[in-house]
Amino acid sequence: ETGVTQTPRHLVMGMTNKKSLKCEQHLGHNAMYWYKQSAKKPLELMFVYSLEERVENNSVPSRFSPECPNSSHLFLHLHTLQPEDSALYLCASSQGVNGNTEAFFGQGTRLTVV
Amino acid sequence: SQELEQSPQSLIVQEGKNLTINCTSSKTLYGLYWYKQKYGEGLIFLMMLQKGGEEKSHEKITAKLDEKKQQSSLHITASQPSHAGIYLCGADPDRGSTLGRLYFGRGTQLTVWP
């Protein structure tokens, strides 16, 4: 248990569906991240939030829409996804500004797009 | 973007043997992180190295950073089945960054057989 909780753990969705991934951290951190892990590819940083503001978007398609309503919660809204979006989506948090930089990861959501 | 090359891609060792995993960066390393991942799960933070020549140990795992070579190594002494998993190195691309956003290598799959 790392203090970062992701739900759901598994998700199967059709290409026309809309779904959301949720991440919650109980560590008092100020920075949160979404990563994508596909088979045979390095872990890819998608979005970075610091103090609830998005500070980085690594050329992620608009069918992925992040939301950070407060420093403890992070969402990833999904719509009209493609089969190649199937992957393990990992959320992480770190202390952020003026803090230690090591990131703590959630268990991930295994997403399958059919 | 920063690229991290890990070697070997996979490693199978007998319990009790020592092993080393390497991580080489295409750019200057300002911070190098080692994580362990069980298949399909989140990443567990192992160690962070920030200064050239720095060496850290935790139980039977030792990590070193060679800043000049832009390289880090992870050494496991007297391996056990509990060491099995995927070892990932990650690097922060920016000097003085206070955020934990990382770029990762592809990982090294370690199998330890009794």
Image (cartoon, coloured by chain):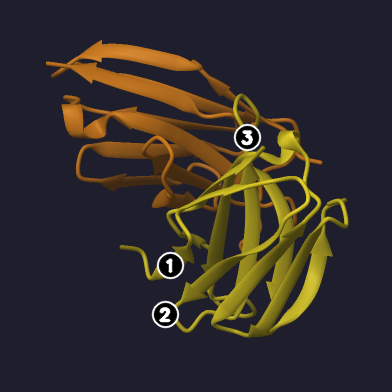
Chain colours: A yellow, B orange
Question: Which residue shows up at 60% across the image and 33% down it?
Answer: B105
Label 2 – label 3 distance at C-alpha: 27 Å
Q: Which quadrant holds the N terminus of chain B? A: top right
Type of amino acid at the residue the image marks with label 3: Ser
Q: Are marks 2 and 3 on the same chain?
A: yes
Subunit bearing disc 1: A
Type of amino acid at the residue the image marks with label 2: His
Subunit bearing disc 2: A
N-term-proximal mark, 1 vs 2: 1
In the picture shown, does residue A61 fall above or below A8? above
Report x, y in % for residue B44.
39, 51
Label 3 – label 1 distance at C-alpha: 20 Å
Q: Quadrant for residue A33, please give it.
A: bottom right
Which numbered tag is attached to residue A5? Answer: 1
In the picture shown, does residue B97 fall above or below A43? below
- Which residue in the structure is indicated by mark 2? A26
Which numbered tag is attached to residue A38? Answer: 3
Q: Which quadrant holds the C terminus of chain B? A: top left
Report x, y in % for residue A55.
80, 71
Question: Which residue shows up at 45% across the image and 54% down it?
Answer: A9
